[in-house]
């Protein structure tokens, strides 16, 4: 009992030291105030018609209260169904993804929450490593402690990459459909939500068939989560 207690104490200090070490080079949270994308250029012909686009595009910040409910439902049902229940990390989703990946023999499902993705988009690079993953968890917990769920979702929607150089829901709505995000229909919302899994491969400009199939899967997710009925899915 004595040595077990000593081992637990040492384990506690070692774990604390490891977390302290990993937080040494964490970026400043002030990064959240910066712009998420680099410069972009749009080339127009003499009639003012766009014929080429280079670089990334970031639209105006979209307020959550102005966005259609079906857009938020599509995102949450597909990316993080337990978003309003977890504290930044979802052990249930991680376990489910582990089982599904084990069955498939490859990575077919991820367990990252919207909060983790927001933390990654705000503070970290796309480089994958165990250290970066632990830092992502630490930053996700920080976001959950300091921001509301609505603020986290807003940060995510205004920063996440939707493909074709579009960062954020406003840029994506304009890039793919030529409208403000407030005017998105259910099927358009499902298309954008479906893009998040693979923005390049599911890009409706390059692969409309794959984008359509994925959008209908998002609609099924919305039915499964109770956001829409089966009749609405069939009508869409």
Image (cartoon, rainbow, N blue to C red):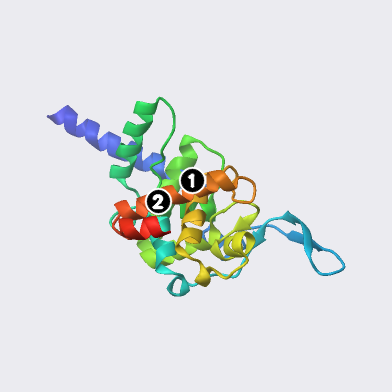
Q: Please name the residue shown 54% across and 59% down the image.
A: 159
Q: Nearer the viewer, residue 189 or 9?
A: 189
Point 14% across, 30% down: residue: 2
User: Crowdedness of circle 1 by 10 Å Cα count: few (<14), some, many (20+)?
Assistant: few
Residue at image coords 38%, 31%: 101
Residue 202 seen in this snapshot: no
- Label 2 packing within 10 angstroms: few (<14), some (14-19), many (20+): many
Q: Is residue 91 above or below residue 62?
A: above
- Residue 96 visible in the picture: yes
Task: Give the position of the C terminus as an image quadrant.
Answer: bottom left
Is 36 left or right of 188, judged from the image as shown?
right
Residue 210: x %, y % from top left: 54, 43
Residue underneath mark 1:
213
Q: Residue at x 30, y 37 (%)?
A: 95
Q: Position of residue 168 (x, y in %)?
A: 56, 61
Q: Is residue 172 above or below residue 67?
A: above
Local SS, label 1: helix
**Of pointers 1 and 2, the one earlier in the residue sequence:** 2
Residue 78's tag is: 2
How far apart are the alpha carbons under marks 1 and 2? 14 Å
Q: Nearer the viewer, residue 27 or 94?
A: 94
State the residue lying farthest toward the right.
Answer: 46
Residue 107 percent across, percent down from the top left: 44, 32
Image: 185 above or below 75:
below
Q: Position of residue 181 (x, y in %)?
A: 53, 68
């Amino acid at each position: 009992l004595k040595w077990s207690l000593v081992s637990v104490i040492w384990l506690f200090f070692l774990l604390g030291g490891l977390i302290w070490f990993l937080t040494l080079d964490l970026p400043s949270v002030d990064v959240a105030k910066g712009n998420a994308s680099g410069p972009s250029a749009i080339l127009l012909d003499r009639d003012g018609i766009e014929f080429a686009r280079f670089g990334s595009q970031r639209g105006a910040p979209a307020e959550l209260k102005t966005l259609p409910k079906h857009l938020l439902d599509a995102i949450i049902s597909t990316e993080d169904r337990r978003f309003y229940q977890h504290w930044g990390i979802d052990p249930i989703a991680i376990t489910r993804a582990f089982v599904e990946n084990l069955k498939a023999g490859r990575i077919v499902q991820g367990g990252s929450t919207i909060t983790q993705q927001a933390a990654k988009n705000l503070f970290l690079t796309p480089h994958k490593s165990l250290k970066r993953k632990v830092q992502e968890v630490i930053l996700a917990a920080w976001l959950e402690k300091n921001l509301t769920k609505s603020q986290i979702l807003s940060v995510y929607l205004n920063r996440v990459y939707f493909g074709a150089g579009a960062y954020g829901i406003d840029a994506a709505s304009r890039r793919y459909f030529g409208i403000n995000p407030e005017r998105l229909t259910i099927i358009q919302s499902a298309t954008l939500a479906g893009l998040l899994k693979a923005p390049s491969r599911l890009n409706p400009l390059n692969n409309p068939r794959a984008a359509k199939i994925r959008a209908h899967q998002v609609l099924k997710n919305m039915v499964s989560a109770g956001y829409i009925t089966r009749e609405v899915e069939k009508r869409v």
